[in-house]
Amino acid sequence: MTSRVPPHPDRADITLQGVLEALVDPVRRSIVAQLHLATDPISCGHFDIPVARSTATHHFNVLREAGLIRQHYAGTSRMNTLRRDDIDELLPGLLDACARDHQAQTPA
Amino acid sequence: MTSRVPPHPDRADITLQGVLEALVDPVRRSIVAQLHLATDPISCGHFDIPVARSTATHHFNVLREAGLIRQHYAGTSRMNTLRRDDIDELLPGLLDACARDHQAQTPA
DNA sequence: ACAGAAGTTTGATAACCTTCGACATTCGAC
DNA sequence: GTCGAATGTCGAAGGTTATCAAACTTCTGT
């Protein structure tokens, strides 16, 4: 089966506290920024982040449990997409701010 | 002299990282929400927060150093105002989101 | 000058979070 | 079924932060 589906919170269960806790970490904010700047889903292993794989797993779990990303399996890869609508409803402007900040800190 | 003025960061030195670190704490977010919902400056002692005075001092320092509030003395009281313009420039929608969340969690 | 009000400073403590390496798991291809 | 690639799980180590009580400072009234 290609559908070990990890638990995602409903939109109504996404809290500002959870979102802020998730985004206060630079690594997680970078992940969100990369997703926001991309158009297609990205697998966990294809992000540009400076941490070990086990640490990356932790960060993706935090993002999913906070309601920021949606995850589904494609083979052994775990694909990630942003929950744009849900995030925008909670705090419009957040994704753009993260992306802008990310680009400002990422030398061309 | 009624002007011991604590150091405030310039607008250009306000970072998304610092702002998020400041607002991830529920007590500090509550302070910001109360300021956003008010029209006039509020002294440190007049906020509705569940912590000891020494802890409150710490939280106000964090908020000021992050660039979220401006502080000035009036007698023995330390008055606080929101740096609305600076915050809006960095992350429009943030203050409203904090205030909305605060009101949702504060039973009438 | 004194007393009280409003904050601040100073440790100390406890909780939390990120990070890693090592080992286990799962899926697709062959 | 075996192998390799992509993740997940599991402690342990390290650093950071919130919290408080107690003692100190500063300012306003009287």
Image: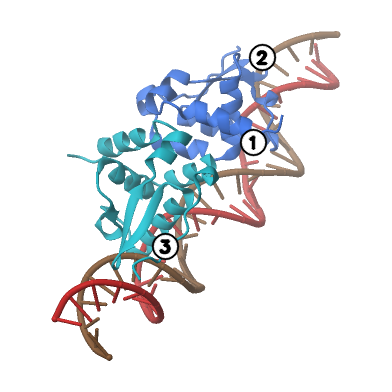
Chain colours: A cyan, B blue, C red, D brown
At a point 30% along the width and 41% down the height, the residue shown is A36
Disc 3 on helix, strand or loop? loop
Closer to viewer: mark 2 or mark 3 = 3
x, y percentage for residue A7?
Answer: 47, 58
x, y percentage for residue A3?
Answer: 37, 65
Q: Which residue is mark 1?
A: B105
Q: Which residue is mark 3?
A: A5
Q: Nearer the viewer, residue B74 or B45?
A: B45
At a point 39% along the width and 49% down the height, the residue shown is A69
At a point 61% along the width and 18% down the height, the residue shown is B38
Q: Chain of mark 3?
A: A
Viewed as shown, does residue B81 lie left or right of A54?
right
Q: CA distance from mark 1 to mark 3?
A: 31 Å
Who comes first in sequence, dot 1 or dot 2? Answer: 2
Viewed as shown, does residue B5 lie left or right of A28?
right
Q: Amino acid at mark 1?
A: Gln
- Image height check: is A15 above or below B30? below
